[in-house]
Amino acid sequence: MKLYSVKMRASKNNSHISGAEKIIGKPALAAAVTAMTKRALEHSLGEADFINLKIEAAAKEDITVLPALPVSSCKSDTVDGSIKVIEAKLRELDISDPQKIISLLQNCCHMRGAILYDIYTGTRMEPDPIRGVRVTYMDSCLDTQSIINKNHFYEALVLATKVAHAPGMVAELCISDDPNYTTGYLASLKHGYLRLAPVKKYGSSHGGRIFIFDSSKTSVGRLIDYLEKAKILVSGIDTSYFPKQSVTEYAQCSLAQLKKQQLYRTMTVIDTPQNKNITVQQKPLLLFSSNDYLDLANHPDVKQAAAAAALAWGAGTGGSRLTTGTNGLNTLLETKLAEFKGTEAALLFNTGYTANLGVISALADKDTVIFSDEYNHASIIDGCRLSKGTTVIYKHNDMADLEAKIKNTAFSKGIIVSDSVFSMDGDIVNLPAITALAKKYTLFTIIDEAHATGVIGQTGRGAVEYYGHTCHPDLIVGTLSKALGSEGGFVCGSRLIIDYLANKARSFIFSTSQNPAAIGAALKSLELITASCEPVRSLQHNVSYFKQALSGAGIKTTGETAVIPVIIGNEQTALQIAAELYAAGFMVSAIRYPTVPEKTARLRIALMSSHTEQELQNLAGSIKKAFLKHGLLS
Ligand SMILES: *Cc1c(COP(=O)(O)O)cnc(C)c1O
């Protein structure tokens, strides 16, 4: 395989901040360039304003592979102890004045290159005594793709191995000029790579590198030529020297961090089925945070249907839909869902989450640009990340921004994807504008109706009905687990797109199909919603009633649906208010970063069709009381 030498040098205000080099194969080249550029732009010393990247092909014959010097360590109690060891080792190499060489380094600081010291004449020979002699064109044979942090030991070992093999070289001595780093090394073919600590006092910025050579064995020109130009790969590096962190330790640190930021989350065990009235540790609570908007999860007919489906079809399906997992139940539900949403066809997924993953990653290839609302649900974000397309985020429901971004982006295939009802803000997508833009610029449209199905539109059919059937997205994603009270995800669209997804959506193909009970329940829920729009109407009444109650109490909200956000801002205050409401008998979620942007922590109130006007009034009153207490209302 052909190899390439890649070198990066970065500076800021004309002063060096970072450098790196590699000798690697073609497949790793682009990633290495990206990583080096990133390193230069995100360096702790500042963002580089000048990056010099040099890439050269290197013929295999021009590269010498050298075995890494064997590594050993020597720890002393004092700096003097280490210096004595160095002196003794240098004498073993027939160097008569080791103290002179060591003191050269002890008085040196901030040299970019190394001192070149000739033991034959006892003089320094580097052509530029300020800069020193540099060593380049070297790397290890290790696969270093995944090395994120620069490892000083490993880089030093590569350099020391190259230097030790230079013509006329006797030894190299290195004392770092980094004030925080007191480990140094002595390297030679005779002694290998000897790590020494401590070689200087902590906090001292004196140090550098010295190459000790013998001019009776080589010319200075030949030596410098080797150091600067010979291409060397070092094999056999012992990777146990890489600093290691256990994954458990990493997890522990992450959790501690979350707790410090008040972002640590725990699970509340609810003792009763999902109903507006629940108990937690025997405390009765009125539930205002469930997505079971139409009270179907615990509906007697729905439970009965789940049980009947399990009895008739079993507890599981034993395979994915394309193997043994397709039965009459899932195909019937698909037909009913397509009917309900007014599309040609539908396809079931295990959850709404995996529906978004599968749909977006299947539809967007590398030539696709996905325009995604900044407040889209995490499953849409993850679908975009999983796809090979490019994601362009537009401002929340801002059609001018969306159009500007479409105009400013060169793409062959494009998709607009948006929540239909936004899950944390409860507002509704501007579907007429989105479909008009899609038509104008030839884009495919996807809306996610997780919080819209059973909630908006006169009969709960979602955004298309809400907008009076004047506009139609290309694809609707939905969930069976919110207003439909069951579990599962689905998509509705044209027969062609559904066929495509059944063949291409990996979360559909490689996962066992849903259990019959979930499907039986969803079929019954759909039947109930279609038979009577009473629950939907009751939910919609509660939405307008509660919004009025809030505004009567002087509290603002942007919600237009069953999701009503009350923005508090501060994470801690949001948690406190939720706790106070809890004490007063209301279960309301406090939603924080990362679910919503930082400093927009909020109460997220979810309404159900069964909440009474009195209950809604009581909640509004309690929120007002908490707001007054925390100085959020005057
Ligand atoms: C809840 C939700 C999902 C995920 O649906 P599940 O069936 O719970 O996995 C997807 N999209 C949006 C907008 C949601 O609110």
Image (cartoon, grey):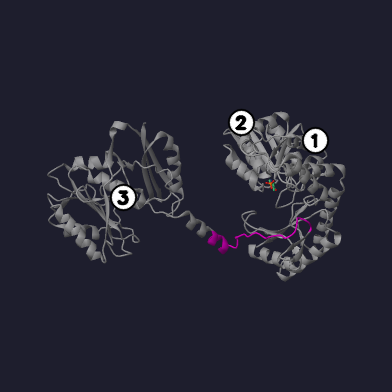
According to the picture, the residue beneath numbered tag 1 turns out to be 339
Magenta residues, start to end: 255-276
Whichever of callouts 3 and 1 sits on the residue coming sooner in the sequence is 3
The residue lying toward the viewer, choosing from 476 and 441, is 476
Q: Is residue 245 left or right of residue 553?
A: left
How far, Cα to Cα, is label 2 from label 1?
Answer: 32 Å
Callout 2: few (<14), some (14-19), or many (20+) C-alpha neighbours within 10 Å? few
The residue lying toward the viewer, choosing from 534 and 595, is 534
Q: Residue at x 36, y 31 (%)?
A: 2
According to the picture, the residue beneath numbered tag 2 turns out to be 412
x, y percentage for residue 195?
A: 28, 56
Q: Nearer the viewer, mark 3 or mark 1?
A: 1
Quarter assignment of residue 514: top right
Whichever of callouts 2 and 1 sits on the residue coming sooner in the sequence is 1
Callout 1: few (<14), some (14-19), or many (20+) C-alpha neighbours within 10 Å? some
Q: Look at label 2 and name its amino acid.
A: Ser
Q: Look at label 1 and name its amino acid.
A: Glu
Q: Residue at x 66, y 34 (%)?
A: 324
The residue lying toward the viewer, choosing from 329 and 422, is 329
Which mark is drawn over residue 179?
none
| 118 in magenta | no
Q: Nearer the viewer, mark 3 or mark 2?
A: 3
Helix, strand or loop for disc 3: helix
461, above or below 272, in the image: above
Callout 3: few (<14), some (14-19), or many (20+) C-alpha neighbours within 10 Å? some
Q: Is residue 293 left or right of residue 101?
A: right
x, y percentage for residue 365?
A: 59, 33
